[in-house]
Amino acid sequence: MKLIQLNDSTDFFSPTYIEIAGHKVAYVSQTVPSMAHKTPLLILGCAFEGIANFQYELKQISKDVPVYLVDLPGFGTNLSKSHDISYIEYSKILKGFLDGQGIERCSIAALSYCSPIGYCFASLFPERVGRLMIGGVTRKLRDSVRVTLEESLSLLATNATDRFASSIVLNIMNFSHRHKVENSEVLKKALYDSLIALNHDEKEKFNAMNTRFMDHGDLPRAPQCPVLVIGGEFDNFMTPYQCYELAKSCPNSSFVIVKGADHLLGLEKKDVLTRLYRRFISDRPLNRMKDVEAYQGREFPKERMRMEPRWSLNDVGYLDSGNGVFVPISIVDINNSGCKLYTSFKDHPSLKRVKRFLLHLPGEEIQIEITLIKQTDDGHFRGIFQHQSFECSRRLEAFIEKVALNSNSELAV
């Protein structure tokens, strides 16, 4: 997997590779002699970030504790095969790495696709973990995220390269809040370029990583060590509320939101994330930090559970399954993620046969792919938009802005 690079720097690390139970593990470490006696921090590389991206973290955090940057098979700079490795097996590989390095106890930082590895390791081997920091994580995937990832992998399998790359960018990053995220346009291009350039082996690894992510089910029992759960303010892939719920399930947890970031908070707010790591591993307070909202002992505000409001529409549109037959529907409410639909034709053959349609919006030359994921007995559906084109997403955004201006109500959570 290619890493996202935000500049032309070639000052990359040359990782060391060691073999653990038949699997290659890449790592780089740095220790200040006066800090060598302290519990080290392991930072796990992820899908688009790895050893080459963590130079800043290594330089700053090694002032406090020894630091190991670790790319497990199929993550970061480590391109070794990972198709059949479960999160439990990854935990065992990580244990083998610690054993080989003579590390009895460590702290772990892992974001996004690697968060389940850190979580599982801390749950399975509690005696080996001092503190755990995870972000962009949930106990169980939402149906909408699963459907969206399945659609993206289908595009990857059929070599629809542009639509595949666009779908990943539009769903992992929060397109509708891009103006509130620093370097959003730069990151969007970098992520798109990295995806469009995947070779055959990298496509296989991306497929394996996402298939594992979708299949992991519910996570095991909560780690007992101190846990810091981090959410991006605008993360619509793994929402802040989902992160909060996971934090609540851990008996010794803290939860914070990083302001002005979405799911790529490790790239968007690298300095803030590094300060969070340093403060948490040294047991310093997390409140009153710039760009950080701490929720220790606080309930999550109900009005922030949903990332975007659903706007009342109640207008007629059409579902097109591609066979020339249009099913008339009423669009009850809508936002950039999806909509609620109603049809008196709930027994229409097209609705029984397929779940993917083109939705023709009322009074607009806009058609967007939609997947129906829920149906009630009274003819209501919940549909998830499949964002696979930047231009189409911009046009939908403009349509919803008009709806919001003319809508009498923002629907409740």
Image: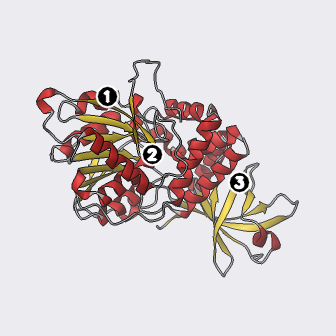
Q: Residue furthest right?
A: 324
Colour mapping: secondary structure
Q: Which residue is mark 1?
A: 56
Mark 2 vs mark 3, CA separation in Å: 23 Å
Mark 1 Cα within 10 Å, few/some/many (few <14, many 20+)? Answer: few
Counting from the top left corner in percent of width and height, residue 54 is at: 36, 31
Q: Residue 91's mark?
A: none
Mark 2 vs mark 1, CA separation in Å: 19 Å
Residue under label 2, please give it: 263
Q: Closer to the camera, 280 or 211?
A: 211
Q: Is residue 387 left or right of residue 108?
A: right
Above-or-below relation of 222 to 156: below
Q: Position of residue 391 (x, y in %)?
A: 67, 39
Q: Is residue 128 left or right of residue 27?
A: left
Q: Amino acid at mark 2?
A: His
Question: Which mark is nearer the camera, 1 or 3?
Answer: 1
**Pointer 3: what residue?**
369
In primary-sequence order, the first of circles 2 and 1 is 1
SS state under label 3: strand
Circle 1 SS class? helix
Badge 2 crowding class, 10 Å Cα cut-off, few under 14, some 14 to 19, many 20 or more, is many
Residue depicted at x 59% and y 30%: 193
Label 1 and label 3: CA atoms lie apart by 41 Å
* 115 lies above or below 340: above
Disc on the earlier residue, 1 or 3: 1
Graded by Cα atoms within 10 Å as few (under 14), some (14 to 19) or many (20 or more), the crowding at tag 3 reads some
Q: Is 166 left or right of 214, judged from the image as shown?
A: right
The residue depicted at 65 percent of the width and 36 percent of the height is 200
Q: Amino acid at mark 1?
A: Tyr
Establish if 384 lies above or below 189: below
Q: Residue at x 59, y 37 (%)?
A: 202
Amino acid identity at mark 3: Glu
